[in-house]
Image: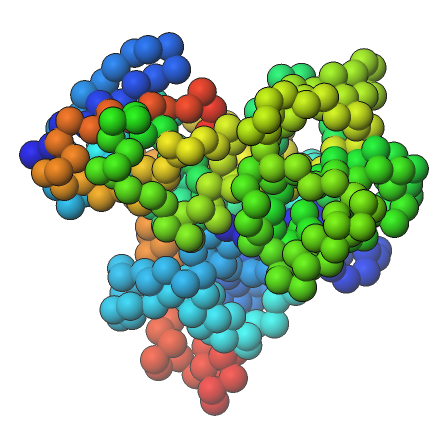
Amino acid sequence: MAKITFVQEDGTRQEVVAEPGLTVMEAAKTEDVPGIEAECGGACACATCHVYVEPEWREAVGPPSEMEEDMLDFAFDVREESRLSCQIRISDKLDGLVVKVPAKQF
Amino acid sequence: MNDTNPLQATDGEIGAPIETDALIIGAGPCGLFAVFELGLLDIKAHVVDILDKVGGQCAELYPEKPIYDIPALPIVTGQELTDRLMEQIKPFNPTFHLGQRIDALAREADGRFRLVTDAGQIFITKVVVIAAGGGSFTPKRPPLEGIEAYEGTSVFYAVRRMKDFADQDVLIVGGGDSALDWTLNLQPIARSLTLLHRRDDFRGAPHSVEKMRSLVASGAMRLLIGQATALHGADGRLERVTIKTKEGDEPLACTRMLPFFGLTMKLGPIADWGLNLEENLIPVDTEKFETSVPGIFAIGDINSYPGKLKLILSGFHEAALMSQAAHRIVYPDKKLLFQYTTSSSSLQKKLGVR
């Protein structure tokens, strides 16, 4: 199991324990993490599961794919550390991952 | 999600009021299958959808994604499912009104419903079937403080009249075809034009990107890489936009802004039709899938009832039961005989296979 921490705009932290193989979006939805909407259900088609990966985790998480980059155009306040959480697959390597939830998903 | 803008497309001619048996709101899989189930019972349907194509989320959000839980179709993509449903409902010849949203619904003195689209088309119908899924696809509004105050005067999500942009300082935001096409179309008439995108990479057609880049090179327009962070103006009139770029904040003179951030689903005007709603869903019974207003039904993702599952297959079942109840309203004096398509010669005749 891997522990994923979601940090809200106001600093509230929520830890979610998830099975490797799931996506970070799925882990968030299972525990009703606020601010992760995932309107399209994980098809990389809506950009409403946007998160910011904490600096120390960026290398382990890796960069977005080209399709994800295109979809990030539809997110707001996109930064270098932006990812769509439905496209981050959880592995043991990501145990301890910390992501920030944007103030708004649009 | 692509960023075609449904508000730009108003298909067909807007004519006299259309009288029909059933008006289906939403051309997603459930709306399309409702045409079939109603058709088997001789109920003629018109279908309205805000998108400029049929298929709803299947066509707009995941046309190429495989779906694995449609009975008897072990794997089918959103677009294939849409195409197959269109083929299945062909015998019933429904009329589609695409690129339109139903804005108003009221009951007539004779018990029928009068609905009006945003394009002004009027429908008079005996039953209404709301198959609107997650709501209507509407352009995403950038979460910039106070943007609402400028909408319709300085901030637009579609270009209805090009002359509204003539001699204006135009800012277009986005990196897809809508952003690029309007950049190329408005640049000749605008006083100044700036295209703003978060990265120096565009999803739009390569030849449009090329044209845009040569306009930038010749000094006819500007391309900024960054994001808008604040709007400034008064009384609905935009004057400046703060743009955050790598170099820092830049104030940009701007009197017209066109943000193209794709579409999102919003319940929209359905909220104003006097129906009971629970958390943006429409509660229905599980016998007829009728709403709190007799004659208005809701099927598919938009309804709610104990045990509801938002599955396409559930919506198909709901369409079948809804049609039985609709029959009692459309043909109050006719007895409805339950029949199978495998054996009923009358159903087979309707399907054109006999």
Tell me: residue A17, above or below residue B185: above
Residue at the far bottom: name it: B354
Tell me: residue A76, above or below residue B43: above
Question: Where residue B347 appears, x then y in whole percent?
Answer: 46, 77
Q: Is residue B135 left or right of residue B10?
A: left
State the residue at coordinates (56%, 54%).
Answer: B203
Q: How many marks?
A: 0
Question: Where residue B174 appears, x then y in whole percent?
Answer: 62, 42
State the residue at coordinates (81%, 45%).
Answer: B219
Q: Is residue B265 left or right of residue B116?
A: left
Question: Is residue B222 visible to us here?
Answer: yes
Q: Quadrant of residue B157?
A: top right
Q: Is residue A28 left or right of residue B271?
A: left
Q: Quadrant of residue B98?
A: bottom right
State the residue at coordinates (10%, 38%).
Answer: A92
Q: How is the image coloured?
A: rainbow
Question: Where residue A25 appears, x then y in whole percent?
Answer: 29, 36
Between residues B136 and B114, which one lies in front from this camera angle? B136
Tell me: residue B122, above or below residue B305: below
State the residue at coordinates (41%, 48%).
Answer: A68
Between residues B143 and B292, which one lies in front from this camera angle? B143
Question: Is residue B129 visible to us here?
Answer: no
Between residues A68 and B135, which one lies in front from this camera angle? A68
Question: Where residue B73 appears, x then y in whole percent?
Answer: 29, 70
Q: Is residue A86 left or right of residue B64?
A: left
